[in-house]
Image (spheres, helix red, strand yellow):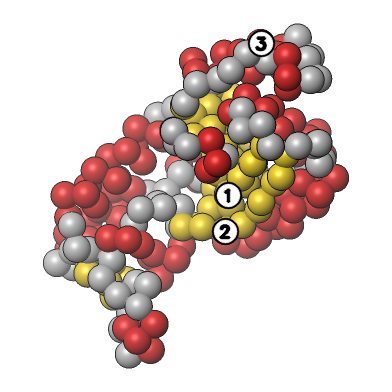
Amino acid sequence: MQHRLVLNWSKAHEALKQAAKNEIKDPALIPLTGKGWTYVTFSPIGTRPSLFLFDVERIRALARENDFTLPHEVVIQHNKIVITAYSEDGRQSTQLFCLHRLIEAYGRRYGDSTENPHHSFYGKFGGIYDRPEKGRIWAIYSKDDQALLEILQSVERLAAENQMNGVRLDVGLSNGLSALPRMLHGYDDPEYQRSGARHYKITDPIKFHVLLDQALIDYARYQFE
């Protein structure tokens, strides 16, 4: 069975979409792209979204049941891979071109789901930053940390093989709900960690709910069929 690569393109990335359709190889020929996210899935036909997407409502319910605290185990389960493209010219279209090329290379390399059973993912690429020096990113999520680590190793190899003049790619791990750790009392405090505490108090429940609501909005944009 084959993995299928599906992109739900952002309107802000229309120029890149057309460039890909027309097989343009030079990013300098692509008009400037705007801020936004293009949503990507890579999974066998018939994949149920519930097998991949975080159970956001479970996190919400768990927080409510525990006086707005979250256990350490729940927080670290929600990881992601982040590939950031930085370009010498600072053009978003150059950065996005490089990321899209990497995504397509991934699809070709790991298309056989029998040989690569742990390489399914969902994610998005683009960004909403105004500062060009922050680059553009490709965020990758998968169903568990073992699969994520296999994908990380694969992406690192592909990034090394698909270098593009004038573009630097950085690959690393981050928390899947990026803003969540900043809402947790003691999460980044070594002394708090050394104390043996295994739960973190949510310092701003309103922002916490906004974060989860945004995740649910994102989930509606991932296309598995």
Query: x, y (%) of residue 66?
Result: 18, 68
Dot 1 falls on a residue whose secondary structure is strand
Q: Residue at x 73, y 19 (%)?
A: 28
Residue 223 seen from this side: no
Q: Please report the residue visible at 30 percent of the width from the left and 53 percent of the height from the top.
A: 58
Marked residue nearer the N-terminal end (1 or 2): 1
Foreground pick, 37 / 48: 37
SS for dot 2: strand
Q: Between disc 1 and disc 3, whose residue precedes?
A: 3
Question: The disc labelled 3 sits on which kind of residue?
Answer: Gln
| Distance of label 3 from label 2 (alpha carbons) | 31 Å
Is 61 in front, or is 157? 157
Task: Give the residue at mark 1.
Answer: 82
Residue 185 at what x, y percent from top left? 25, 71
Check disc 3 and report the residue beneath it.
Answer: 18
The location of residue 203, given as percent across then percent down, is: 19, 63
Mark pair 1, 3: CA separation: 25 Å
Asked whether disc 1 touches disc 2, contact meaning CB atoms under 8 Å apart, the reply is: yes
**Where 62 falls versus 200 (above or below)?**
above
Alpha carbon of mark 1 to alpha carbon of mark 2: how far? 6 Å
Q: Which residue is mark 2?
A: 173
For the point 61% across and 45% down, the residue is 84
Query: Crowdedness of circle 2 by 10 Å Cα count: few (<14), some, many (20+)?
Result: some
Is 135 left or right of 216, judged from the image as shown? right
Left or right, 93 with reference to 153: left
**Kind of residue sitting beneath label 1:** Val
- Taking depth in this image into account, of 109 and 45 the one nearest to the observer is 109
Residue pushed farthest front?
89
Other residues around mark 1 within 10 Å, as few (<14) / some (14–19) / many (≥20)? many
If the image is split into quadrants, where does the N terminus sit? Answer: top right
